[in-house]
Amino acid sequence: MQTIRWGMIGCGSVTEVKSGPGLQKAEGSALVAVMRRNGELAADYALRHGVPKWYDDAQALINDPEVDAVYIATHPDTHYAYTLMVAQSGKPVYCEKPLGMSYGQSKEMVEYCKQHAIPFFSAYYRRALPKYRMIKEILESGRLGKVRAVHILMQQAIKDEDRKNGGTWRVRPEVSGGGKFHDVGSHALDLIDWFFGPVIEAKGEGLNQSKVYAADDMVHGYFKTEQGVAGTGIWCFDSFRDEDTTTIHLQNGDLSYSVLDIAAPITITTNEGIEVINVPSPPQHVAQPLIQTVVDELLGRGTCPSTGESGMRTDYVLDCLSGKR
């Protein structure tokens, strides 16, 4: 096999620029079919993006003999069912995050795929972007000494669309599994897993301070990785501005970066002063570099850094910090 032919379940906004075109443009990759429950919208997506086939039934797409692997780009409340459907067909799964509505669901997904030797990948695309690869290289170089602690601060103002009719799907727990913490806050925790290894202990609390929507808008807590790195975090989604900074405290300095602004520079602070490191411009389709690693692994020429197991670990920390475990 020289080309992975993808089927995509879900044709929402996340696929328009971020990921859908990446499946088409990655080397050795082709997007051959898309599915959405609304057939008219599926057909429209296929026409606009030059995709040969469209479906309004997920099982029909999965059964298509010309589909080699499936990307699940739906809301979290359907990830579990779709992942098992794809895995039962024997085809590899690439799933958006968070993987499940809970760590329990994610664990079942991972264990099923593992038992049946189904390749399973999670869509934490920052692991493949140049900025975060640079951070990992700096940390592993030892130039700043050993890591002592990490602090994550993420805050956002409540968006107008979340003040009406219960808000968007992201702040409806029955669809997203939580709130903005699960949607965007998860990226910060996934990077911690990638930089320092699995979190082995975490505890926190989720609060609904604004009462604007049903989901928690504040999460705070602490965690510790298997390497002994201690961390704290505050995720506030009822603030007056959008801001996020993760600060890694090391023996010889602090390294700070934005999780959500993938073009913002890296900052290193030492006794000698402040060093600002500019990063490469992000690609047009930000998920494409990670998609390339998925394709490369499926073709036997590389390894993807974002797996079902790493996604499951992040789901575990999400549950712990939000007080669900």
Image (cartoon, grey):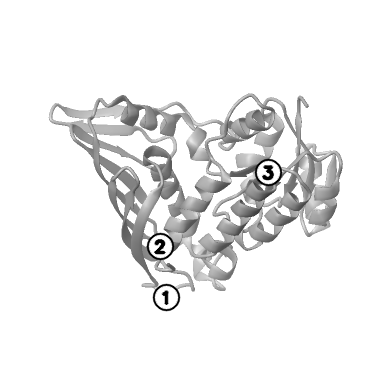
Q: Quick one: label 3, few (<14), some, or many (20+) residues within 10 Å?
A: few
Say which element carries label 3. Answer: loop
Q: Is 16 positioned to the left or the right of 202 in the image?
A: right
22 lies above or below 318? above
Q: Please indicate, yes or no, whether residue 239 appears anywhere in the rendered image.
A: no
- Identify the image quadrant of residue 121: top right
Q: Please indicate, yes or no, whether residue 270 appears anywhere in the rendered image.
A: yes
Q: Residue furthest left?
A: 271
Q: Quick one: label 1, few (<14), some, or many (20+) residues within 10 Å?
A: few
Q: Which labelled disc corresponds to residue 320?
A: 2
Query: Which residue corresponds to mark 3?
Result: 117
Query: Which residue corresponds to mark 1?
Result: 211
Q: Position of residue 288 (x, y in %)?
A: 60, 33
166 lies above or below 70? below
Mark 3 or mark 1: name the one nearer the start of the chain: 3
Q: Is disc 1 in contact with disc 2, using a CB cutoff of under 8 Å?
A: no
